Structure formats: C-alpha cells, structure tokens
Amino acid sequence: MADPLDKTELAYDVSDEYRPEPAPIPEPPAWQDGSFRIGIHTSIAGDIAGALDIASKLGANALQIFSASPRMWPRGGTRIADADAARFRERRSELGLGPLVIHDNYLINLASPDRVMRARSIQAFHDELVRAVSLGADFLVAHPGCCMGSETSQAISEIAQGMRQAARGIKLGDLRILIENTSGMGSAVGARFEEIKAILDETRDLPMGVCLDTAHMFEAGYEITSEKGLDWTLELVERTVGLDRVYVLHVNDSKTPLGSRVDRHEHIGRGKIGLQAFGRILNHPRLGPGLQGLAGRAFILETPIDLPGDDRRNVRALWELVGVDPKQAPKAVDGFSMVRGKKKKISTQRARRKKVGGKKRPGGKK
Ligand SMILES: [Zn+2]
Ligand SMILES: [Zn+2]
C-alpha cells in the first residue's frame, strides 16, 4: 500500500528549487591521461622554443629545461618577451608535450648565511617563478640550498621563508614548486626526506611538491637497487613527504656508490644503480601513472651526453623499461641528438668540475 506521505513528496517539484549553475570542472591537461610521461633535460641554446622540438625529436613526451643560463647571475632583464613565450606555448601544444618542468639556476642558495647572496637568491628565484609562469610550466624544480656552516633547521627556515618572499605578488596559477632531494654533497640540505618534509611544512601557503632524483637518493644512502630496499625507501617517502606529492622523478644512474654523497650522473643501466633496478623503479605500482601511482608523474632524464645520440638512447631505454610497444612510444628522429659532432665529450658536470679546479662543490648539481 502506498504511503500517503509519498504523494506529498511527489508534489514537490525539484525544478522549482533554485540551484546555481555548478562551476565547470576544468579539463585535466592531456598529459594527465594516465600514460607514461618520459622526458629529458633539453638545451635552450639559441632558441627557447627549440628545446621543445629537441625533446620531441628524441622521442620524449615530456621535458625539462632551464629558463635562462643556469650558472650565471642574470644581467639586465630576465623576463621572457611575451611574443617568445606565446610562441613557446603554442609550439608545446602542437607537439603535445607535458608536463613542462623547469629547473632553477644552480647559483641560487636561499639558505645562504651571506645576506647579499641570500637577497640575490630570492630575487633570482622570484625571476624563475615569473619566467615559469610566462612559459606555462607545470613544475619548477628547486634545489633546497646549502647551509654553509649554519644549522640545518635554521637553513630550512631560511629556505622556506625565502621561497615565500620570492613568490609574493605572483599569480602562480597551475605552477607547482618541487623541492629536489640532494645527494648531500658538501653542506647541501635535502639529502634526507625528513628535511624536505620540514621545508614543505613551512611553505604550506605555496603550491609545493617534491622531485626525487634516483641518483641523489642512492648517493645519499637510500638503497633503491633491491626490491626490498626500494619498497623500504618508498615507504619512507610515503611517511615523510607523501608519495602523492612526488610529481617528478629525475631518472639518473649513478657513477658513484651507495652513500657516496658525491653526485655524478651516469647513463641508464651503466652505473651503480643498474638496469634491473630502473625496471623496478619505473614499473613500481606506486610510482607509475597507474591507479596506485599519480597520473602525469614524469620521469625525466638528466643523463650525460658523452657521445652524440646518448640522449636519444637514454630516452629509448626508459620506453623499453616501461614496456611501451615501440610503435606506441613517441617516435624519435633516427640519428638525432642535441649534441652534434664527435670531437668533444659533452658533460655538464665535467665542464663544471674543470671550472672549479676539480674540487667538490656543494649543491652545484642538478
Ligand atoms: Zn644530480
Ligand atoms: Zn636531478
């Protein structure tokens, strides 16, 4: 038997009720479609938009760049002309590359106890943010900094405060700042996940995240080469910064052994981490783009280019490791490399070491 109350309810016409139009849910960018995003750090020499074509020709579908010279304090204007930025964005969408990651200048040290150096660093980081926004970058990867004698806890507060100051007055939009873990060379902060967490805790008002570099983890003493070691390390990441805040992985093999605290990148599979370990890392259910992972998480190479073609080969190695059918993976241009000629060995790290007289320089690595 029908309940008479039902009738009363039926008489109520829901369309009479005022309902504001729901705000349209913004479409997630195409690179967050759950596919593997594999990229490489590409050169902006000559033309910044050229970096996009390089990444594409190397068979990558994501990329990392510097937005200005990484080892010089900028002289004069540091902004990117509107027309150049517009051309860059347009070319990027034509090529379907994403995410776009920008790596900050190596000289920036927000933890510096030297006041002039710190002020300069804050200004330079501010400029990094402005350029990243104008290029439509998704992530700005930043090295935490070096404490150079001051207490780590003090350095962490300085870094957080410096970042907040640098971001003041900028509409960051979808840009996220990612703190990169370090190998712990010299007095570099951020070799331990707990230190990165402490920075995140003090920058809650900013859109923050983490970039994990495999070589740096290994060099800092995290044993990611065995299945057990990787699980243990990821559990520690989860308990500190949280895996869902790791938006980018720098995928580099290491020339130096576990816990060396000396940062030297090596080709995938040719260093102390090894191919098998990289297979486990890239395909780990919590790291990949699948359900337990994070859609759009990017794996970016910062491997050396000792010979022309090393860049293309390292990109291909990653696609092979994730088991993407070569027909489905983005197609590289045969024989293409961002380095031409066979005379000179190209390694950013080697060049820098020469410049500082072979001495280890803290925090000077990407
Ligand atoms: Zn490095
Ligand atoms: Zn890195």
Image (cartoon, rainbow, N blue to C red):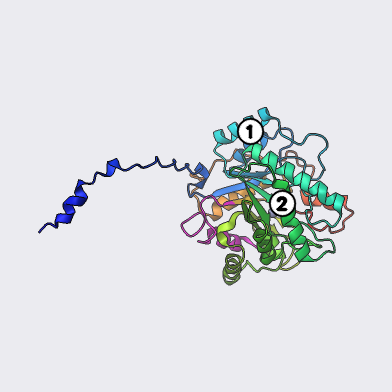
Mark closer to the chain start, 2 or 1: 1
Is residue 274 rendered magenta in the image? yes
Q: Is residue 181 magenta?
A: no
In the rendered structure, the answer to whether residue 184 lies left or right of residue 136 reads right
Counting from the top left corner in percent of width and height, residue 330 is at 54, 42
Return the x and y of residue 181 as percentages of the image width and height: 69, 59
Cα–Cα span, label 2 and label 1: 26 Å
Where are the magenta residues, as a range?
Answer: 272-298
Ligand 2 lies in quarter: bottom right
Q: Which residue corresponds to mark 2? A: 163
The three-letter code of the residue at mark 2 reads: Met
The amino acid beneath tag 1 is: Phe
Q: Is residue 303 visible?
A: no
Q: Main secondary structure of the magenta part?
A: loop
Does dot 2 land on a helix, a strand or a loop?
helix
Q: Position of residue 135 (x, y in %)?
A: 64, 37
Q: Which residue is mark 1?
A: 88
Q: Within 10 Å of the Cα at label 1, are there few (<14), some (14-19), or many (20+) other Cα atoms?
A: many
| Quarter of the view holding residue 53 | top right
Tell whether circle 2 marks a residue whose Cβ is less than 8 angstroms from ligand 2.
no
